[in-house]
Amino acid sequence: MNAAINRQVRLAARPVGMPKANDFSLAEEAVPEPRHGQALVRVLSLSLDPYMRGRMSDAKSYAAPVGIGDVMTGGAVGEVVRSETGGLKEGDLVEGMFGWQEYALCTRGSARVLPDSRFPPSYALGILGMPGATAYFGLLEVGRPRPGDTVVVSAASGAVGAAVGQIAKIGGCRVVGTVGSDEKAAYITDDLGFDAAINYRTANDLGAALDEACPDGIDVYFDNVGGPMTDAVMQRLAFKARVVVCGCIHHYNLTEPYLGPSHLRHILVNRARVEGFLVLDWLERYPEAFARLTAWLDDGSMTYREHVIEGLENAPEGLGMLFEGRNFGKLVVKVAER
Amino acid sequence: MNAAINRQVRLAARPVGMPKANDFSLAEEAVPEPRHGQALVRVLSLSLDPYMRGRMSDAKSYAAPVGIGDVMTGGAVGEVVRSETGGLKEGDLVEGMFGWQEYALCTRGSARVLPDSRFPPSYALGILGMPGATAYFGLLEVGRPRPGDTVVVSAASGAVGAAVGQIAKIGGCRVVGTVGSDEKAAYITDDLGFDAAINYRTANDLGAALDEACPDGIDVYFDNVGGPMTDAVMQRLAFKARVVVCGCIHHYNLTEPYLGPSHLRHILVNRARVEGFLVLDWLERYPEAFARLTAWLDDGSMTYREHVIEGLENAPEGLGMLFEGRNFGKLVVKVAER
């Protein structure tokens, strides 16, 4: 092995509000030696995802926070360069929580070996990975759309939102996406086949925009953002509506709790169901999601877009782009050539 | 028939905020004549319920509002005094939406004939009527408590809340009720067997009070009130918690939307389910609820308390008591002796 140095991005401080450059530090250490049962992975691409903001905070969440001084957590794909376990061999492409670093140790149990595929390995961080499974199970198992339903998805050009909308279209729904630019609005309607798009940055009145796009009310809301968009959607729920609470990125970087109008009366009157969703609860069924998503990519009924940032050291800036909605497509950081 | 005059309370104006005396008017008209297929009912007791506030407003709800000048809507029990339908006979005790008046017409399909019972007919407005069915189906079908769960119910000494808590106790749960006086707190713990009570009017810190009463978090929240209590409960949901949105009486008389902290993150992190409930959706299964509730009253595993107001003309004031929490037990208006 040639590289003796493992560059890392570590969490230097708990961010207050939006994460800043000095909440992270660059570090170098020796590339670790795999012990029996382990393999050494050379990281090719990192995933940047909204959930990472939660890991940087010590507020209660579904997973423990990253410790100060620890390597920043995150999914990645890489290539096995040395193996001391029978389950992994040199050259295997693997996906796992390898963190923001150039090299990581893993075990057979902590890595997913990627199948041969005509798609780039980085797809395993997006449409053929956690975000794709999030869209698939969140929409189908919690949102439970029926043909003819009106489905609204927020952050609709993002990794999860774009998949949600396309799966809903395959399922015969009317699909409306909310996005943060006219370019993204054109993308989801022209390229992804959404029926309508709302640019929340330029809409004068979110409620009026929703009324126009959803004249029969909203049967399923797949929510990635929270905030004023969710407040407007909740007032337009249809009878027996389902709201998939998948994320609330609007809230993640606020230093005070988000205050808004109560949703209770709308939930009550419509007998709506609002349910939190975490994809990790569906881990055992990931293969089903990946098989279907692969088939839909293969037959052209889905398309997928990546936003690639070059260089491990630029991951913190990429996370800032994500939280400000400046990315266009699934954000990945290219760490090394295959 | 002796009485030629039917006294009524009509809706005179749409209330702004809390309903006031001059939102209603007293009126008299001739007692109506039943036509073929109808029966004439002499009303004995009226029910006062939180949902009535919604009927007085023209905001979207699950039922059309009462028209200005119309008899105020509401459930009542009465005695059939003349019948022109084979399905009802003189002397039958019936329950139905007879409204705030001394006499009403009904059909066999719009009235429930009460079974012989050792309980007063007015129980058919409470524990053996819509509020009892609300508690039964809302808790068991939407809340889905399991033995050992911690169940919190708001407005716990009210018609619905008291039944919810007692059913949850029968089901092996730890039960905590929130109430508005120390007398009600003593009632739900000492007489109804709740494990703990929180007086929201005197608790300095609702969150701390909930933490003390629910050290393992809240598995089921049966919500009748909304407002700050719900905001505090939402921050203490247990994993896979269920929230039954049955009412939000705290909001009904506000002239501005209730603003509070978003619940989304708590719903997400705990994969909680928040679901609106309306008992009318369960109409076909009411006999099941009434049979079980009757059995629990008979064997002493439930008790029931009424707060009786004398005189039809005092119904508006009674509704004000309800919205201010000044009632103690299920509110009924006694209109006539049997």
Image: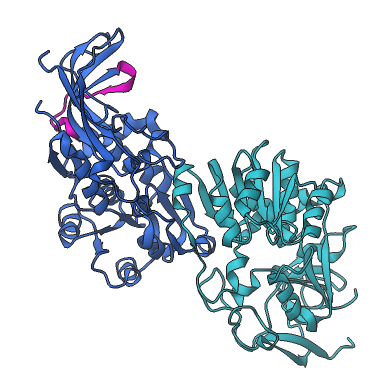
Chain colours: A blue, B cyan
What range of the chain is rendered magenta? A107-123
Q: Position of residue A319 (x, y in %)?
A: 24, 44
Residue A173 forms part of the magenta stretch = no
When asked about the image quadrant of residue B62, the answer is bottom right
Establish if B233 lies above or below A84: below
Residue depicted at x 35% and y 48%? A16
Is residue B96 or residue B320 the one in the foreground? Answer: B320
Residue depicted at x 39% and y 41%? A57
When asked about the image quadrant of residue A258, the answer is bottom left
Is residue B190 or residue A157 the one in the foreground? Answer: B190
Residue B266 is left or right of residue B36, and the answer is left
Is residue B238 or residue B82 the one in the foreground? Answer: B238
Residue A178 is left or right of residue B224, and the answer is left
Is residue A219 or residue A283 the one in the foreground? Answer: A283
Q: Where is residue A52 in the image (x, y as percent from the top left)?
A: 32, 40
Residue depicted at x 50% and y 60%? A267
Residue depicted at x 30% and y 32%? A73
Residue A141 is left or right of residue A272, and the answer is left
Q: Position of residue B332 (x, y in %)?
A: 79, 70
When asked about the image quadrant of residue B134, the answer is bottom right
Establish if A324 lies above or below A85: below
Establish if A299 lies above or below A256: above
Q: Position of residue A66 (x, y in %)?
A: 36, 33
* Quadrant (top left/top right/bottom left/bottom right) for the C terminus of chain B: bottom right
Residue B318 is left or right of residue A55, and the answer is right
